[in-house]
Amino acid sequence: MKNLNFILLIGLLVGVGNVLGQQAQCSIKGEVYGRSSKTLLLRKCSDNYRSLYENPVKIPVKKGVFSYTFSYTEQEAYELVFEDEFKSGNWRAIRVFPINGVVECKLYPQDRWEDNKISGGELNAAYEAYLNTRRSLFESEGIRLGRIQQELRAKDEFDSPEYKEALQRMRAAKGDHDALVPIYSKMDEMIKTHTCYTEKAKLLFVDPYDSLLRAELLWKYEKIRNDPSIMSYSLIWSDVEMQMKQNVLVERLVTEVFPIFENRYPDHIYTKLIKAQVGGLQAIKVGSKYIDIVAPSVDNDTVQLSNVIQGYVSLIDMWGSWCGPCLAKTRLVVPIYEQYKSKGFKIVGIAREFKNTDAVKKRLSKEQFSWLHLVELDDRQNIWSKYGISNGSGLMVLVDKDGTILSIDPKPEELENILQQKLN
């Protein structure tokens, strides 16, 4: 009964702090130990990770001390990231929940990430308790399996011969994006089917590790269900953002608990984002209808997608000038487009861009993408969310003349086979 009362009290306090339009001011202050980093980056977890590239909030660290004050009107999770780690590509975010007051931080090098201490407010305390419980339940088994993985790699008994060959081809291709696309595709398929591992690795590491992750997910969502706080909501959003598209279990668990949070926080930013992501992921499937959108072209003409592709077999190519894998995939369909464009095949590109259209116009001047291009600028239309992509690096959706989805991310040979059947 005491635990139940505590949970209800936390939920009540969080609800008070979540009143929309009620401005609060938070000061994040702290000390950095054992590292020479000069700058911290801050982002709201509801913002796309591009915000860390595009005009990020920078907090200077001087003599191991930092301080930053900001206003907010809605309670949600934020993340602190060391800029030097972020630029290296090997970074790990530190979650912070703002309060109307001061949040104190003690931050350590990445190899001591678990020593980080965030103090101030019920949500930060609840998140620390969640992390500590998760470690006590699952960390020792994770460490044991990690050692097994290291031993298998040391003996060259982890990667299958086929996967090692693909790795060699990838290294040989270096910066050749056109050559890398089929290699990445093959590697991705091997990872999904577990053929990238040796049989010994599957038995000793992969299968036990998958079981551990499943057990952790089931425990996590049971905890989330019993504690419908903003802290729990932030955990759901993180899974939607990073895992849901690739993990069927995550999709099921999110779908089960989301109504609880949608009812509790109907106007919260997480509700809006998750509702769009879940709806898009469930809608964009083979056999369903594509989602119609209205967006500006690169020439700033307003275009409704259905007006362009109705009556054609069409490829909706969601890409970005900044997205290397997207560009490489799109280049592979150029010859197919040239072969079938006169037979009733259309491509419409939807470029996800930020700030302005300068980058996409510059990129298009260098490419042979001679079809219509629309622009999703600063996620104003929420097209990526509507299609369930979140922070993914793009998507290709092939639709029939009546708008029925024929394939998701078709490979060039699959695309050509479908076009042969539909248009010849």
Image (cartoon, rainbow, N blue to C red):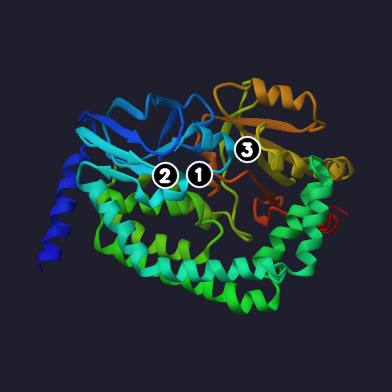
Asked whether disc 2 touches disc 1, contact meaning CB atoms under 8 Å apart, the reply is yes
Q: Is residue 377 left or right of residue 237?
A: right
Which numbered disc, 2 or 3, marks the residue closer to the eye?
2
Q: Earlier in the sequence, mark 2 or mark 1?
A: 2
Within 10 Å of disc 3 (Cα), the crowding (few <14, some 14-19, many 20+) is some
Label 2 – label 3 distance at C-alpha? 22 Å
Which numbered disc, 3 or 1, marks the residue closer to the eye?
1
- The residue labelled by disc 3 is 305
Question: Which mark identifies residue 410?
Answer: none
Label 2 – label 1 distance at C-alpha? 7 Å
Question: Which mark identifies residue 273?
Answer: 2
In which quadrant will I find the C terminus? bottom right
The single residue placed furthest to the front in the displayed view is 34
Taking the spot 29% from the left edge, 32% from the top edge, the residue there is: 28
**Residue 401's spot in the image, x, y percent?**
71, 50
Q: Earlier in the sequence, mark 3 or mark 1?
A: 3
Taking the spot 56% from the left edge, 59% from the top edge, the residue there is: 246
Q: Secondary structure at mark 1?
A: helix
| 303 to 285, vertically: above or below | above
Q: Secondary structure at mark 2?
A: helix
The amino acid type of the residue labelled 2 equals Leu
The amino acid type of the residue labelled 1 equals Ser
Q: Earlier in the sequence, mark 2 or mark 3?
A: 2
Question: Which mark identifies residue 385?
Answer: 1
